[in-house]
Image (cartoon, helix red, strand yellow):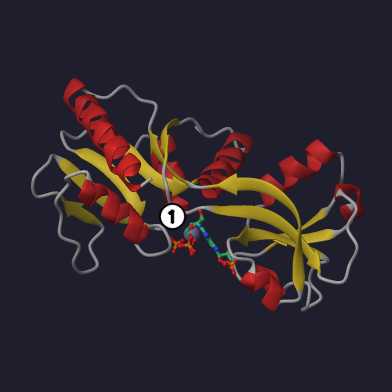
Amino acid sequence: MQTQRLRIAIQKKGRLSKECQDLLKRCGVKFNMMGERLVVHSENMPIDLLLVRDDDIPGLIMDGVVDLGVIGENELEEVGLERAARNEPSDYKKLRRLDFGGCRLSIAIDKDATYNGPQDLQGKRIATTYPQLVKRYMDEQGVTFSPCMLNGSVEVAPRAGLADAICDLVSTGATLEANGLKEAAVILRSKAVLIQCTADLVAEKQALIDRLLTRMQGVIQAKE
Ligand code: PRT
Ligand code: ZN
């Protein structure tokens, strides 16, 4: 069901939401975020913003429910691998890497443990929210491991005796340090990206996307 208005999925509340809203505003999209609404209509352009959990954004794009989305590459790649493994649609177009949401997905181990390379993780149990990305990395390294899937509190898993190591997002490293862990290997460097569904859109919508992209280019360059 293709609507006349361009649908953009963005994170409702979290690390990407403010910068994402700021970027759209700087691109000239006027809207008023208020209350707990799922859909916010732009006041000056044929655009509807869909405010959702970031976990839902890749699937909404891959299923063609929305036209555009802003999402961290970590989440995008994890969901893409998960869907591909289930033979569900996992295609999207990456339109632009954005200048926020930067972090790395890293394997971390006890701060006093020695680490000479991925082979040191052989047979270990690794707690993570990103099992697909960990598996891809470990397969590439030819190392086998046991997963421990956690959607939160990943960094406390070693201390709690649930896992030998973790694989989680890191930005300053303060969380790892506070939990007696150290970064051993970076498996993905991530930023927020603008993605589009692969379906052909009506000409007016595609023209609007192209216009937004040109403005985005200017906005991001002006900040550099
Ligand atoms: O509610 P919803 O599901 O929408 O949000 P969420 O809680 O799943 O995601 P959120 O808002 O925490 O993060 C959204 C996206 O921001 C992530 O998918 C990343 O792409 C990006 N991002 C950038 C980060 C970080 N930096 C980050 N530091 N996401 C999480 N962290 C966490 C990390 O998990 C760890 O707990 O911050 C902690 C580490 O930070 P440092 O500074 O101590 O190293
Ligand atoms: Zn999430």
Under mark 1, the amino acid is Asp
- Residue at 34% across, 51% down: 10
Q: Secondary structure under badge 1? A: helix
- Residue at 33% across, 38% down: 68
> Horizontally, is 56 left or right of 161 in the view?
left
Looking at this view, is 34 or 119 the one in front? 119
> Horizontally, is 217 left or right of 133 in the view?
left
The residue where tag 1 is placed is: 54
User: How many discs appear?
Assistant: 1
Looking at this view, is 137 or 19 the one in front? 19
In this view, the residue farthest toward the left is 44
In percent of width and height, residue 212 lies at: 24, 35
Question: Is 97 placed above or below 151 here?
Answer: above
Quadrant in which the N terminus appears: top left
Quadrant housing residue 211: top left
Q: Counting other residues with Cα less than 10 Å from the Cα at mark 1, is it few (<14), some (14-19), or many (20 or more)?
A: many
Quadrant in which the C terminus appears: top left
- The answer to whether residue 198 of the structure is visible from this angle is yes
In percent of width and height, residue 32 lies at: 15, 60
In percent of width and height, residue 41 lies at: 15, 50
Mark 1 within 8 Å of ligand 1, using the beta carbon: yes
Question: Is 26 placed above or below 17 here?
Answer: above
